[in-house]
Image (spheres, grey):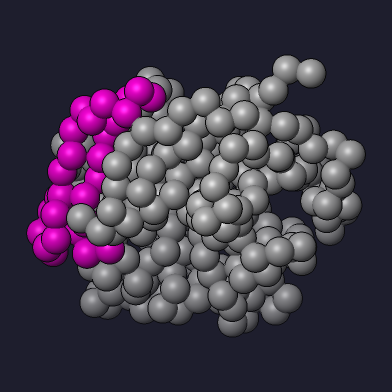
Amino acid sequence: MKRFFLLFLLLNSAMLSQDYQLVNQFGLFLDATSFALSPQGYFYVADNGSDEIYKIDSLGTEVKAFGGYGWNNGQFDYPIDVSLNALNIFVTDKNNHSIQQFDKDLNFISRLYTREGDNSDAAFGFPLSTDVSSMGDVYVLDSENKRILKFDLFGKYMLQFGGFDAGDFAIKNPLKLIVTENNNILVLDGMSLIVFDLFGNGIAKITLPEKFNSIDKYYNSITLTGDSTIYVSSQEENKLSFTKVNLAAVNGNTKFTSSLAVSNKIYALTYTTIFSFVLSEK
């Protein structure tokens, strides 16, 4: 538990907060659920309203859109999460009970579907989130069975954890997971943040100060996103702490769904657009 103790202590520390100014907004979506930013500077946005994935640049120019409602390869029914590694894009297709993998140009590569297989340990349904470790292992947040499943990059089942037999680390109200740069798995679970190692062993469970919609990462930077609040992490070795940022010039009716901290910028996704904030100079 000591490994992530600083997280709880710093969540409400106003003394460490930083001010960010709104400088731009771009993109036009119907019901955006998740986004990710590639090393090449392209945003990949999952839109549940159109059942499509958009590839756009930082100026809001749409490079490619694909998908649409359906159950075939390259089609979606509630694309709830999008994540990536250096080469590929992973789309969590909730109502089709699958994870679809694409290259950076959004060409279809593979589909992971195990719900009707012979191995009940490997079966997942209504997945909520997917992420990939630095070693290429794929972690799936299974909402139907309230657990996490681990597969290799070729779709071979490896293990499951966080289920009812995990004791204090059992998942109850899963929302999203990420895999950190040092290969810990962080699960946003209701009002808690649960931390596992890459073998599925529980490390820590932290009670959060408010309800968050998402946890996201961009390399070592991790964010927690509420309806109108964003907390940004600083990470050193085995220490992880979050501080709340002050976002200026945002309409009070704006609701954030997720966010990314990139150098001195914060990108905040809403259902319809992306806001770009820059750190104020003091």
Along the viewing direction, whichever of 108 and 12 lies nearer the viewer: 12
Q: Quadrant of residue 207?
A: bottom right
Q: Position of residue 107 (x, y in %)?
A: 16, 37
Image point (74%, 59%), residue name: 203
The correct choice, above or below, for 237 with respect to 216 in the image is above
219 on left or right of 85: right
Image point (42%, 39%), residue name: 274
Along the viewing direction, whichever of 86 and 70 lies nearer the viewer: 70
Image point (69%, 23%), residue name: 280
The correct choice, above or below, for 128 with respect to 57 in the image is below
Q: Position of residue 270 (x, y in %)?
A: 44, 49
Task: Give the magenta part as a residue range.
Answer: 51-79
Residue 65 shown in magenta: yes
Q: How many marks?
A: 0
71 on left or right of 20: left
230 on left or right of 37: right
Q: Which residue is at the far top? A: 281
Q: Which residue is at the far bottom? A: 164
Which quadrant does the C terminus fall into? top right
The correct choice, above or below, for 86 with respect to 162 in the image is above
Image point (85%, 44%), residue name: 14
Q: Position of residue 152 (x, y in %)?
A: 39, 49
The correct choice, above or below, for 187 with respect to 264 in the image is below
Q: Position of residue 51 (x, y in %)?
A: 21, 56
Query: Is residue 183 at all visible to an observer of this figure?
Result: no
146 on left or right of 19: left
Which quadrant does the N terminus fall into? bottom right
